[in-house]
Amino acid sequence: MNSIEQELEKNGIKVICPINTFNINEIATYVARLLCSKFPDFHLNYNDMFNRISRLNMYIADMPSGMSDACYFYKNETIYFRKGISFDDIKRLSFHEIVHHFQEIKDSKGVLRRLGLCTYLKVKSYGAALNEAAVQLMSSFATNEARDTVTYYGITLPTDSPSYYPLLCNLVKQIGYLTGFAVLFESTFFANNSFFDKFKFLFGDNEAFKIQQNFDKLLEIEEKIIKINIKIQTKDMSYLKFKNATDSINRYKSQIRKTFLDTQNLILTTYFNNRIKEVRTANEIENYRKQLSSFSSLVGSAENYTFFNDFYISKMAEIDKKYEALTGNTEIAIVKKSAFSTLFSSIRNLFSRSHSQLENNIN
């Protein structure tokens, strides 16, 4: 058994059979077309994309419960798909894994040093969860995944990816809305620094790093829950061990809820507190108001969570004062509503907005 087989076995992946050349070519056609049509700013060549994808190895395999239905393994440039899923699902899932293939940057010895937004330093990685979420957001956009509002761990949130990394995709979309999706997707695919430069410029180095760390924390906690669930499902447990396991899951769920909301609050306050300092003109005031109002359609909520509403009210009041100081007028004429009418009308609709306000930002 070679080292690749040993590592696959260690991760519970058991190869069943290869995917035939005809089906690999169909996958290559599907993904190459999506890459070229959905991301024209990448200036990709269809024939080059098709040729590179069609040379990848692809297999059907037994994969552990709780693991994703598809997995890219960079050491042998191979994609493994879970036994039993349909070919349509294989094609859809292949987009995410093939993006991972294009992301990778290796050193002269073939050691992975960077994967999109993730950097590998010896045995430690930085930004793995941020990268995973960005790739999934790209995949959802490319494959026209239906957006939905879901509830996980006591958090109700809109997400472009209801089944895969829904919380992380929600948070990375919040960031992409503020940095711009073009720079987020470009750096995700080409593994360059453009996104991080913009991210740190808007948020500051410390805050950007903290947000990135929180992404990794969320992914790590979810993986702990998955492992405990697998033990519960596959092992006979005494009542005490079962109770300890379920108590651990509940603690981890609380940690996820807190980390998600803390991260959302950090994204919100850091950006909009920094941005309001730069507002000088009536047009900038209106743009700020619209941006904060539109951001509300991305926000996750939970029982007793009032932070966003409170912050929204305080910032709108601050913007109103800026406008009054600028014009000497107590009414924001540029929106043709009184300040209080605008404020409370917006608040009433905070969590009932559709995603239509964001379409132009991602398309």
Image (cartoon, helix red, strand yellow):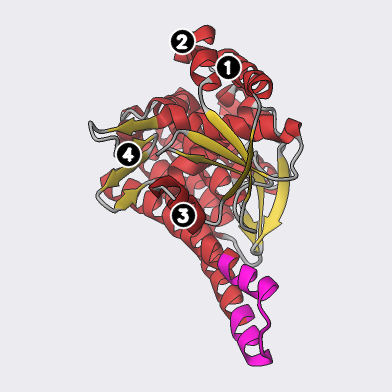
Q: Amino acid at mark 4?
A: Leu
Q: How many numbered discs sit on the rendered protein?
A: 4
What residue does disc 3 label?
263
Label 2 vs label 4, nearer the camera = 4
- Residue type at mark 1 is Ala
Measure the C-alpha gap from mark 1 to mark 3.
Answer: 35 Å
Question: Quick one: SS at disc 2?
Answer: loop
Give the quarter of the image for residue 109: top left
Q: Is residue 301 above or below residue 60?
A: below
> Sequence order check: which comes first, mark 2 or mark 1?
1
Q: Is residue 305 above or below residue 59?
A: below
Magenta stretch in the rendered image = 227-246
Please rate how many residues cluster around mark 1, counting C-alpha atoms within 10 Å: few if below 14, some from 14 to 19, many from 20. Answer: many
In reply to whether residue 35 is colored magenta, the answer given is no
Residue at image mark 1 = 32
> Taking 258 as reference, is 200 above or below it?
above
Chief SS of the magenta region: helix
Disc 2 target residue: 43
Q: Are marks 1 and 4 in contact (CB under 8 Å)?
A: no
Frontmost residue, 291 versus 339: 291
The amino acid sitting under disc 3 is Thr
- Give percent across and percent down for residue 175: 47, 39
Q: Residue at x 63, y 18 (%)?
A: 25
Gap in angstroms between the C-alphas marked 1 and 4: 24 Å
Q: Earlier in the sequence, mark 2 or mark 4?
A: 2
